[in-house]
Structure formats: structure tokens, C-alpha cells
């Protein structure tokens, strides 16, 4: 592996959920330890399963992995770190400020940025050659701070005054007010991240267009702030040998090769490693040893038949159609297929003679390709996230930012580069269409997280703006927030994949929505191999691995759910989209 040649002291693995960061980080740690190095493996991933991978309990103390000489592990629980962080900030003011203000502060400190900054606060010492880690040859992190968080930490230390003076509706600067460590230690940590002699950042992706685009953005964002020593690992590539007797495997192989051929230019110049798809769950030492090699142990294949008895998408659509109108919102991480499912359901409702407005923030070319035509009763509109975000940023800078000095302006500008800002801007644009749901179905292919909704609600942004524009009081007019909280008017559909990390991330998203008083209506498990009747040995084993995740969704998370099979062909065009619906999952064995 190229990323393991002459490795520096710090190795950071980063990438979206479910691409295999933790597995590759664990396999790397094992390989270096078995080569005679002393290794500390550190996880700051909210979905970390490092302890499960090694079959031991790992906590907040450095723990030896007894089965591998020279390997030690540490799990920083980012949620616990964030809670401790919030308590530290809120406790001193809880009895001094009105409850509404305290709740607003708590919400400002409940988002992803707080979690990431709190975790960074915890592992800063590990990056600055402290006595704690002086004996280790390499320190491996199975996640990395985003470019946005690093830029925040590079800003001047004027956060508290900026917040106290009310110069911004804070989304990401709030957490910074509670940092306790010396600024000099943060500067040293950021220097370590940017120093190629000390740090190597490994971008982990899958051979999928959406994932590669996202990794390219990460690469460009980090390079722009001086972190440029990148390696690329493309994980889970289906071997061509699996395609000979399985049409599904052949189709997947073709898709992956097309995605690799169309890889963004910014990634092409990077040193790149390719890791083949493995049939087995990456748990246990033997599985980890095989991850970075080309050898598979056939004994790890299961001979049990695949049995899946789960509802298909048609079951959910029949129930939605009974409402005759209303708002249907799709939520989930990038790359899970929200746009495709939104388009499929919109088509089916329109095919049944129900009026539908499908509104999307997906690039117009993709949506046009997905629908490949038009249908009576179906209206389609598109919102440009970049244009809406720029408009919103300019609006805030011209109002909130016009009286700020250079330092305050820099702080506000960085706050407006947060992921929350795009959610706010796009949802404001969507809000102009939402009222149509009183007469027809309005289907949205994306939506803000519960945290963003609560943040806006805490500052009164939605309600004040909506009331001002309508000239009516809240009591007499439905706002987007109150509409989303009403299950009679809104159906929130969470989209996920039948894999451990995506299911966990979707469960966390559901908890966020419930905190905002919004109850998700149902879940869709998309692109299921288990529902696609594979014949390839590797795909059959991957299908077995999915069954536990599907069962967890059914038993623990969803009030109603559907499983959508992975299709041989990309679901573009009316006929293929409708095949997602009218090919219900059957109980079967292979």
C-alpha cells in the first residue's frame, strides 16, 4: 500500500460514514505493530467500533490490544466529550439567565461542530508530542477534523466577545467560546496537521461518483488551508472475477469502473491505493490481516441460505397516497439515494392521478436524467444550493456584518461557511413551496437536520421571518416548523443503507428530529443486496451481513420501513424508477 510507505508519525483517516475508515485504520495499526513499531490507535468517530473490531473493551484510557504486541488503543467518545463540554459552559449561567436563553445556548452547542471541536479539544495533546504519547512510534486516528473546524480554530481568539455582543445568529462559533486549553497548544496541533513530515491524511472513499465528489471537495478544502499531504484509498472494489456468473455483479463492476474513470481531477494526482471488496465482516484479527491483502479465506463465507421477508416501497406509497396531499420530506446522509427515491415516489403518486410538486436541491442534470421525461400531474422545480447559500451569506453580511471590524467580519464570514448555513439557505428556499402542500403532494429530496431546525427555532428566525412576511401571527398561520411537527401534514422519510455506520448515523438523525418535536414517519433501506438475489459468492456474503442491519431497523428504530433492492441498472428514467416500486421484496432463498 502506497499510504504505508515511509509513514510519518501521525496518520489520519477521513471520509464519509460507511466507507471503511475504521477498518482500514485498524488494519494499518495492526500491520505497523506486527512490523515491530509501537502504535497508538485513536478513534474519535461517533460511530466507532474499534473495540468490537478487536473483540475487546476500549475506553477513554490507553488500552493494550493483548493479541497484537506493540498495539494500544484509545476511544475518545465524542458525544460524551461534547456533553461534558456543554455542561462546562452552561452550568455557570443556568440560574442567571432566563430558561429560554439557556435553551438557546444549549441548542447552539448541540450540533456536529460542537462534537467535532470537543473531540479535537480532547486529542490535541496527542498531536503535540506530550509525555502521554512520547513512547509511540506512530499515532493513528480513524477520523479527522474537517476543513471547516480547522479554519474555526485558526481564527482570532475573540469568540466570547463576538457572541456576547450578539453579532451573529450563531451556528458554529458558539462552541468555541468554551475552549479551555491554551491557544498555543491549538496552534501547535494545527501546525502538526499541516506538516507533511509529521502528518499524512488518508482520504477513504468508495468507487461511487457521489462519494468521490465529496472526497474531492474535502481534498480541495484542506489543501486551501495548507494541509496537502494526501493519499487516496478507494475501498470495497468488486473483483472482476465475481462478474462471470452474476449479472448484478457485472453491473456493479461496470458502474464502479465508470465512476473511477470519471474521478475528479483533484484526486487523479494523488497517490492511490485500491482495496478489494471483502466477503466477510471486518471483525477479528484474521479478517483485519486480510483487508489490505489480495487473499480471501473461503472459510469465512457463510453457507446459510438468505431469507428476507420485508415490505417493499409499494407498501409505504399506498399509505402515503391515502392522504391525498401533504409534505413528504426525504432525509439522510449523502449518497444513500434520496433524490432517486423522491423521484420514484413522485412519479408513482402522479401516475395514480394525484397532483405532485417534486422540488429538489440536486443538480438539474441529475434530476433530468433520473426522470428522463415528464408526466401529467407532476411538476418539478430545482433549487440551486450554491446560489441560495451565496444569497443568504450576502444578506447576513450586509445586515449583521456591516458594522463589524475586520476581526469580527472574519468570524462571521467563517460562521457562514458552516454546513448549517447551506441547510438554512436551501430550506428557506424550499419554504416558499411548502404551502402548496395544502392542495397537493409536495415532495422534497432533502431537508435540514433536527439540530438546524432547533437552532433556527431557538433564535426565532423562522417564526419571526414567516410572521413578518405573512403579516399574520403565529397562532393564525402555519410555519414550516409547525407543519413539520404535524404528522397529519408531513411525512419524514429517513433513507439509509443496510450497513452498520449508515444505520447508526440515521438513528442519530432520528434522535435529533425527535428532539425538535418531529417524529419520522418511516425508513427506507435503499440499495439492498439481500433483496437483489445475488449469485456472486462475495455479494451473497455481503447480503448475509445486511440481514442484521435490516432486522435492527425493523425492531429498534422504525415504526414502518421498506427495503429497496439494488438494481442491475442505475434507476434513471421512468421505467427503472417504477421498477424500484413494483418489484416488491419477496421472501426467497439463494
Image (spheres, rainbow, N blue to C red):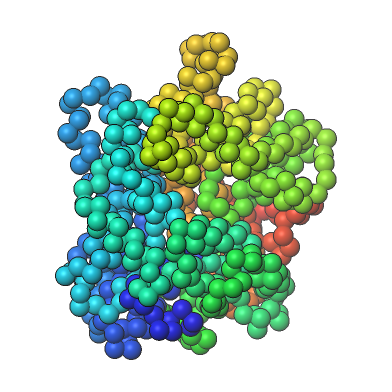
Q: Is residue 16 visible?
A: no
**Quick check: 255 left or right of 85?**
right
**Quick check: 315 left or right of 175?**
right
For the image shown, how many numbered marks are present on the structure?
A: 0
| Quadrant housing residue 195 | bottom left
Residue 401, position as x, y percentages in the image: 45, 31
Report the residue at 59% width, 34% height from top: 391
As drawn, 520 above or below 255: above
Residue 511, position as x, y percentages in the image: 40, 42
As drawn, 198 above or below 460: below
**Quick check: 428 left or right of 368?**
left
Report the residue at 30% width, 24% height from top: 100
**Quick check: 357 left or right of 485?**
right
| Quadrant housing residue 345 | top right
Report the residue at 67% width, 31% height from top: 441
Which is nearer the eye, 64 or 269?
269
| Quadrant housing residue 135 | bottom left
Q: In the rendered image, which quarter contains the C terminus?
A: bottom right
Residue 426, position as x, y percentages in the image: 58, 37
Report the residue at 65% width, 41% height from top: 384
Q: Is residue 342 visible?
A: yes
Residue 362, position as x, y percentages in the image: 66, 46
Amino acid at each position: 500500500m502506497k499510504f504505508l510507505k515511509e509513514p510519518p508519525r501521525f496518520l489520519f483517516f477521513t471520509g464519509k460514514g460507511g466507507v471503511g475508515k475504521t477498518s482500514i485504520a485498524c488494519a494499518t495499526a495492526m500491520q505497523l505493530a506486527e512490523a515491530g513499531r509501537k502504535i497508538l490507535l485513536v478513534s474519535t468517530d461517533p460511530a466507532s467500533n474499534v473495540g468490537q473490531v478487536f473483540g475487546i473493551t476500549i475506553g477513554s484510557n490507553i488500552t493494550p490490544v493483548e493479541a497484537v504486541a506493540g498495539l494500544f488503543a484509545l476511544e475518545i467518545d465524542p458525544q460524551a466529550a461534547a456533553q461534558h463540554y456543554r455542561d462546562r459552559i452552561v452550568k455557570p449561567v443556568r440560574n442567571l439567565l432566563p430558561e429560554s436563553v439557556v435553551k438557546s445556548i444549549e441548542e447552539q452547542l448541540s450540533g456536529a461542530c460542537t462534537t467535532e471541536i470537543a473531540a479535537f479539544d480532547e486529542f490535541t495533546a496527542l498531536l503535540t508530542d506530550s509525555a502521554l504519547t512520547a513512547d509511540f512510534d506512530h499515532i493513528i486516528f480513524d477520523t479527522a477534523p474537517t476543513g471547516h473546524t480547522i479554519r474555526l480554530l485558526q481564527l482570532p481568539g475573540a469568540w466570547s466577545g463576538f457572541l456576547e455582543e450578539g453579532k451573529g445568529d450563531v451556528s458554529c462559533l458558539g462552541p468555541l467560546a468554551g475552549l479551555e486549553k491554551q491557544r498555543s497548544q491549538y496552534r501547535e496541533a494545527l501546525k502538526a496537521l499541516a506538516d507533511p513530515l509529521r502528518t499524512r491524511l488518508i482520504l477513504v472513499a468508495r468507487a461511487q461518483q457521489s462519494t468521490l465528489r465529496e472526497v474531492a471537495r474535502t481534498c480541495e478544502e484542506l489543501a486551501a488551508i495548507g494541509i496537502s499531504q494526501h493519499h487516496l484509498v478507494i475501498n470495497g472494489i468488486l473483483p472482476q472475477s465475481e462478474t462471470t456468473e452474476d449479472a448484478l455483479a457485472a453491473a456493479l463492476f461496470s458502474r464502479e469502473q465508470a465512476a473511477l474513470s470519471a474521478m475528479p481531477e483533484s484526486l487523479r494526482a494523488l497517490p492511490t491505493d485500491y482495496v478489494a471488496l471483502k466477503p466477510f465482516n471486518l471483525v477479528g484479527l484474521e479478517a483485519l490481516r486480510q483487508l489490505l491483502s489480495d487473499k480471501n479465506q473461503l472459510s469465512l463465507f457463510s453457507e446459510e441460505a438468505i431469507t428476507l421477508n420485508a415490505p417493499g416501497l409499494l407498501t409505504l406509497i399506498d399509505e402515503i397516497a391515502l392522504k391525498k396531499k401533504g409534505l413528504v420530506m426525504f432525509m439522510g446522509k449523502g449518497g444513500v439515494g434520496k433524490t432517486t427515491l423522491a423521484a420514484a415516489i413522485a412519479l408513482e403518486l402522479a401516475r395514480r392521478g394525484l397532483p405532485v410538486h417534486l422540488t429538489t436541491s440536486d443538480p438539474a442534470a441529475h434530476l433530468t436524467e433520473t426522470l428522463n421525461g415528464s408526466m401529467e400531474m407532476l411538476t418539478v422545480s430545482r433549487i440551486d444550493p450554491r446560489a441560495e447559500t451565496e444569497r443568504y451569506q450576502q444578506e447576513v453580511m450586509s445586515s449583521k456584518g456591516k458594522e463589524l471590524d475586520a476581526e469580527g467580519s472574519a468570524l462571521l464570514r467563517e460562521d457562514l461557511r458552516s454546513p448549517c448555513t447551506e441547510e438554512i439557505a436551501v430550506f428557506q428556499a424550499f419554504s416558499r413551496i411548502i404551502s402548496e402542500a395544502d392542495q397537493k403532494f409536495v415532495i422534497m429530496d432533502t431537508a435540514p437536520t433536527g439540530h438546524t431546525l432547533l437552532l433556527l427555532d431557538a433564535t426565532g428566525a423562522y417564526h419571526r421571518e414567516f410572521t413578518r412576511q405573512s403579516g399574520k401571527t403565529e397562532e393564525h398561520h402555519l410555519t414550516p416548523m409547525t407543519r413539520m411537527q404535524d404528522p397529519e401534514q408531513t411525512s419524514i422519510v429517513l433513507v439509509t443503507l443496510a450497513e452498520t455506520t449508515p444505520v447508526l448515523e440515521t438513528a442519530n438523525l432520528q434522535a435529533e428530529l425527535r428532539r425538535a418535536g418531529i417524529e419520522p414517519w418511516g425508513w427506507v433501506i435503499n440499495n439492498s443486496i439481500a433483496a437483489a438475489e445475488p449469485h456472486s459468492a462475495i455479494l451473497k456474503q455481503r447480503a448475509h451481513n445486511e440481514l442484521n442491519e435490516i432486522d435492527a431497523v425493523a425492531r429498534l428504530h422504525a415504526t414502518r420501513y421498506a427495503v429497496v433492492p439494488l438494481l442491475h441498472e442505475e434507476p434513471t428514467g421512468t421505467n427503472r424508477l417504477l421498477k424500484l416500486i413494483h418489484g416488491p421484496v419477496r421472501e426467497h432463498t439463494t
